[in-house]
Amino acid sequence: MSLGIFIEFSINVLSMGSLYALIALGLVFVFGICQMVNFAYGEFLTVSAYALYALGTFTNLPWLMVFLLGILAGVSVAFFCELIAFRPFRGRSLEALLVTSFAVSVILQRSFQLGISPRSRAVPIPDFFNQTILVFGVSTPIRNLVIIASSIILLIAFVLLMKKTTLGIAMRGAAENFTTARLMGVPANLVILAAFVISGFLAGVVAIFWSAKTGSVEPMVGSGPLLIGFIAVVIGGMQSLPGSVVGGFVYAIVANVLSLTLPTTLLSFRDAIMFIIVIAFLVLRPGGLLKGNYQEERVG
Amino acid sequence: MSQASDPKLSDPILSVKDLVVAYGSVRALHGISLEVYPGELVSVCGVNGSGKSTTLKTIAGILKPQSGQIIFSNKSIAGKKPEQIHKLGVALVPEGREIFPSLTVAENLRIGAFGRYSAKQFTLDLEDIYALFPILKQRINQAGGLLSGGEQQMLAIARALISHPELLMMDEPSLGLSPTMVDTIFELIATLKERKITILLVEQNAERALQIADRAYLLSTGHVKFAGQPADMQSTVDITAVYLGEGKGGEL
Amino acid sequence: MNSAKSTWTRFIDSKYSTPAILITILIVLDSFVWWLNIPFIEDICTVATITLIMVLGFQLFMGNSGILNWSYAGYIGIGAFASAIFSMTPEFKAKQIPVMYEFLVNLHLPFPLALIAGALFAALVAAVIAWPLMRLTDSVGAITQFALLIVINTMLNQWQEVTNGPRTFTVSMGRITDIWLALFVAVLVILAVFWFKESSVGLKLRASRDDRYAARSSGINIIAVRYYGYVTSAFIGGLAGGLFAHYIVSITAMAFYMGEVFVLLTMTIIGGSMSVSGAFFGTLLITVSQQLLRQLESIVTRSGFEASGTTDIVLGLLMIGFLALLPNGVTRGKELSLSAIKRFLRIGNNRQKQSKGLDQKPSN
């Protein structure tokens, strides 16, 4: 492998990996707190992407404002989903929650088809995102570097949030033992709502970069990131926040390696291969790569 | 604050009346009544399955009562959420300690102080906690799950104390601990009693619990079999009969 | 006379009255539709009968084990493609799918056998992969099944030497499945799922759903009973897929994906996932409402507004509403039986004389 290819590979893995890490983090936040597999997560992202499309197309707001409002859209949809659709099922079976989130996902997708268009819409993106720049002699779009930099900043911010703030510590406690956290005065509604808000925030951030990459948005755009999130989360171990970040990077590495090494005839089976790996992980190593310390205590 | 020796001068801080609790269709409590006055240490004894833990869990809000009243500081708390009840000043040291295993000791304590957290107050409270539990100072940055059973129990008590509760409820604090550690825990409870902290203590180790209690209740299959002075309990009720007669499981 | 009556009474009160009622309703309905001879309605009814088979197979595993079985749609797809490959003549296959593997082109079975072979193949796939997956429950189990659905769908959608890839797969030039065949298979499947539910495996499976730990401690091999349920369910799914393929005639892998799971889930949940009657009435109710909604949709669309997709939105809202308010569906998790109908009628006629004498059937 020549140095150029290696650098290109590294940049790809880093930019994809950090994006996937953010996706996975958004899923794990909710799963860790209320054990809920949120199938509507992809639609949080879709809502943000549509907001970017609308704001970028029909207003003259500065980019920063467009981005912030786009993220806000993701946060709001997550907030209201929890409040309206998921809260009534608190304390019910996990299946009921899962099925509800699946129904919410379908409802949102069809609403986009109905209310906006089944066809894709171009999302305007600042020009400099797609300008290329030379990194160690390899030219790459600036957006890759933006993704890497903002992911690092966000990850540090989240580490601080979870380690230093009372809410963050309470959320980690609630993820380990929800009832005891409530006994210590941590309000269930607050923690779960916070998890959804963070999840929606991450979906909003991902939406910016995802749209920058694809340049468009369509009703089903969220399903791709959702699947990636699932894979990364399973690899990382379902519960663990650092695990999900690792899972995101591992997925990026595996996906890139498969793309480089698989013969073209098998390339179309990449998804199948990835999900076979996922199943193998679930069967053989349900705790993921970074086994959370006390997974076993959480059975039933 | 009233004297522990003559608590009835004031109103009870906690008063439970005719509490009925069921798990599905199985009744665990058949109309329990009990009272705790400010500053006193009340022991609730009974064998496994007599309803001791169920009583505490219901007061703390983990279980919802079918009927009956729970009045704390003149407010009805029956059926309220655990976090609401905690906010009113009831703290529970849960059975089995329930430490957050991957959180550090400091973080565990910080969750205990949730809702009233301020960095300044927390530092002051920590000093207080260190004075009571010197071992926790050494372990402050260790993960809770790595502590020994006794250390975890201390952490659980500290975590409840740091919220400055008006009523401290302890569910089987000596369960599963070594004999020396049991001594330490009971000494600690005695210290807390000296500090005039109101305590509702559930214990299977009736002998030890009765030694330090101001008043005691004996539960059996969800009924109150005795209420009064600990000394009278031994004389009026045949404790061994209650314990042995229905002690299907006995001690662990 | 007397003994005949007591046999009748016993039948009314027994659990055997449930399949008898469901089968009677189905036969009457399908015959009536056939007699009406309106192609549009007969079409809806045939698809509904095939859908009923799908839902019954779906309910068989999900209802008895409590595990959300995403991969089921994949087995319907496997059954559809496999039975089609078996039933098509080599010449037709060679013409339709030039890239197909030689040995597949040469496979050929007469139609009814091809249908069974397709279902058996779906069951075989399930039998080979399912054992290690049966350990997993709750969220992990659901994600595993979800991942499996994606794997199966990718294979169906990409393996062009077998399924013609993402392109349309033409099974035949004309319909092979008709309403009578669908009805016949549906009757057999109703009997089979009842038999399964009351069999010792079904009983153990339900025990494991209600209390995993109690079931295990009373000596039930949970993995084994789940495995039997899963493979049986895959067989029924494969059967329904075969019927579907030979009715719709041209299929693509995307027909057997999330959208299909959504519809099956809606039917199962609104009917009541715990009972076979629930699957039955859920299918009927949702089919009728789907048709009504689609009519509405097309009326609205013709008047100039975009309305396609409204059906799914309404179904999704219905599903959430049912989950929240009536989690055991319209049947409340019970089976419809003659004695239940009798009781209902009696209560309806005379509210004072509520018959407490007749024992309530157990709710599962």
Image: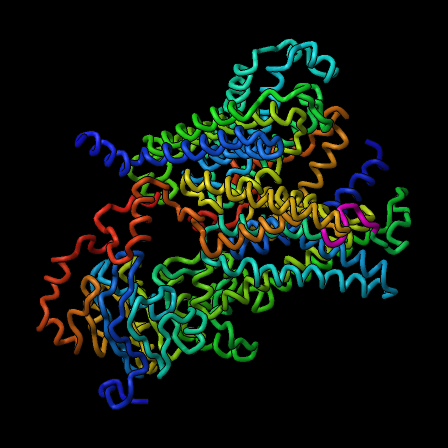
Q: Is residue A280 visible?
A: no
Nearest the eye: B247 or B99: B247
Nearest the eye: A280 or C196: C196
Is C172 magenta? The answer is no
Occupied quadrant, residue A115: bottom right
* Residues shaded magenta: A113-122
Is A118 magenta? The answer is yes
Q: Is residue B172 left or right of residue A162?
A: left
Q: Is residue A291 above or below residue C135?
A: below
- The image's colouring method is rainbow
Tell me residue A271's x, y (percent).
67, 34
Work out which quarter of the rendered image holds the N terminus of chain A and state it.
Answer: top right
Occupied quadrant, residue A60: bottom right
Kindly identify the residue that appears in the image at 62 percent across and 63 percent down.
A79
Q: Is residue B234 left or right of residue C70?
A: left
Kindly identify the residue that appears in the image at 64 percent across and 14 percent down.
C88
Kindly identify the residue that appears in the image at 69 percent across and 32 percent down.
A270
Occupied quadrant, residue B174: bottom left
Tell me residue B162's x, y (percent).
45, 74
Q: How many marks?
A: 0
Q: Is residue A57 left or right of residue C265?
A: right
Q: Is residue C116 visible?
A: yes
Kindly identify the residue that appears in the image at 39 percent across and 28 percent down.
C191
Nearest the eye: C291 or C349: C349
Nearest the eye: C37 or C234: C37
Tell me residue A228's x, y (percent).
67, 43
